[in-house]
Image: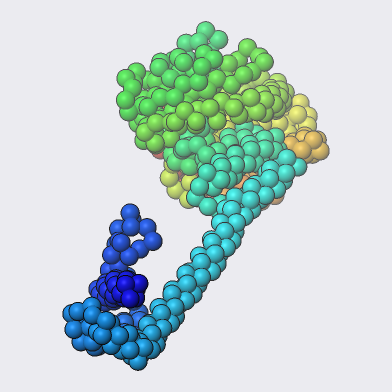
Amino acid sequence: YASGNHGLEIYAQDLQKQTTLFNQIVISLEDRQIAADLTPDPEHGKIICTWDDQSRLQMSKTAADWKQFKTGLDSQLGGHSEQSRLILAAKYIEERGNVLVQSSERLAQAFQYMMQAKLDEIRLFQWLAAGMGIILLGVVVYMIQRLVIRPLNITLEGFSQVANGNFKHRLPVLARNEIGQMTWAFNRLTERLNSMFRLTDRINQGKKLDEMLAFVYEELHSFVPLDWVGVFYASPDGSNLSLERHFSQRSMGLKEGDCFDIHLGGLAAISQTPLALSLTTTDIAPNSLDEVLLNNGLNAAVYLLLPTQGSNRAVMVFASDVQAYEREHVEFLTNIAGTISHVLEKTVVMESLVASAVQGLAKLAESRDPETGDHLTRMALYSALVAEELARAGSYVHCITPAYVRDVYHFAPMHDIGKVGVPDGILLKPGKLNNEERKEMERHPTIGAEVLRRCEAQLKAQGHSMFQIGIEIAESHHEKFDGSGYPVGLKGQDIPLSARIVAVADVFDALTSKRPYKEAWTIEKAISVMQENSGTHFDPEVFAAMLRTLPRMMTIYNRLKHI
């Protein structure tokens, strides 16, 4: 009996314990907060739960079933632990416990479904994360291929193209990053290399210094600010700079032979160190080249000594309307100085040889008629002045260049070179020529043109052309504007402009100079007679240009007159 009572006490205690624990579990699940003492690891504290709709619904049903079950159980126990009450409670549990068990199983199943769904979500997230990782990896690989590997391969191919001599090859700039900057720099380098090789090729093809300077201007102005370029020679004593040739697309008011005191830029120019000047911030000396450049709207200049083998020191001046040249501009110009100097020497030597030949031929013609004195010098200077005036205003502005003026000056003395083929008896006859003698004398333009054509043919065989203006002058300086001249009878614009210019200068000097058969006319009389022949003998526009430049011509006349 005692043993039976002890077993009931244990049963009663166990029932109370299990009931209390189950009640705590139900309350915790209802509150979505599982107490720490109900978890496997109490040290981590309570667990906050989130249920889905199905779990919350089943939780409510299970909690209701538990409350109903517990109410009935408490009613059977009646708050006592007598044997009879325990027996009633046991029977109640046996009869009604199955409902609670089923409800708990449904709750466990709902939790299981919920957890499975969460696991599925986790798996889906993992798959998505893995997929995104693969996609991201693919994107990274693609971007590396597109932004790094492909540009590098293209760059390497570009390097190979340039290494094989294709300096026109340009790399596409595919990105604005370090590789893009490297590509841009590479393209800039190849552009400069191509420009330098093209410049070298072009200036080597140039037969005249004017052509060389034009090529320099055309090829360099895309890399260096450039509005004017000139070549000067320093005097042996280093006291001044003489303008040999220049090129610009603007009118500068400069002409070959202009001399400048060596100040500032010029002084540094004859040293080995290139000099870049900002003319707007530098003290400009009067009568210096710097002053002339600044007065023409050029704000910066680079003076560069060209390496030459002879004693003549050549200085190349680059000028622009920018405020200052950058260091890289000076370095670039310095790097091409050697190439320019080599071609410059070759070109100047060629032009010097031609000029010497021209002077020699002119002196040959002059030697047949020694009474002409300084006629050739005067009429050459007159011709150049008239050509310069025509270049300033009128119909011929666009066809007269500094090179044209220089050629007129050089070849004007050769207008009568054909007289070397005229017999002395006719050429030196003091009186008037008869008809036969006149016809023979009128052959000298044809003879002179033929001589120069042979010279031109020889030069062309060597790839040069120098005598075209000389041929025009020799052949046509006796043609008249109304077509009554000789040897062909050309009229108006059919007569080469160079011949029309020389005709005015030649007649003016002939009228105002003493000849074996006449005295020198006064300037007024000469101008009056020529005015009457303007439009018949002379091109009216050329004669008008001569009148405009007459004050300058008089300076030459007074210095070299032969009366």
Residue 127 percent coordinates (x, y): 53, 69
Q: Residue at x 43, y 75 (%)?
A: 115
Task: Say if 283 sits above or below 296 in the image.
Answer: above
Whether residue 438 appears in this view of the structure is: no
Q: Residue at x 63, y 12 (%)?
A: 311
Q: Nearer the viewer, residue 170 or 300?
A: 170
Q: Nearer the viewer, residue 409 or 264?
A: 264
Task: Say if 145 sits above or below 353 in the image.
Answer: below
In the rendered image, which quarter is residue 469 located in? top right
Task: Say if 175 sits above or below 212 in the image.
Answer: below
Q: Quadrant of the N terminus?
A: bottom left
In the rendered image, which quarter is residue 46 located in? bottom left
Residue farthest to the top, as pictured: 237
Q: Residue at x 59, y 50 (%)?
A: 148
Q: Residue at x 58, y 16 (%)?
A: 313
In the rendered image, which quarter is residue 320 located in? top left
Q: Classify residue 326 as left or right of residue 373.
A: left
Residue farthest to the front, as pictured: 1
Residue 420 percent coordinates (x, y): 75, 29
Whether residue 309 appears in this view of the structure is: yes
Residue 139 percent coordinates (x, y): 56, 60
Residue farthest to the bottom, as pictured: 95
Q: Nearer the viewer, residue 3 or 341?
A: 3
Residue 519 percent coordinates (x, y): 53, 25
Q: Classify residue 163 as left or right of residue 284.
A: right
Q: Nearer the viewer, residue 380 or 267?
A: 267
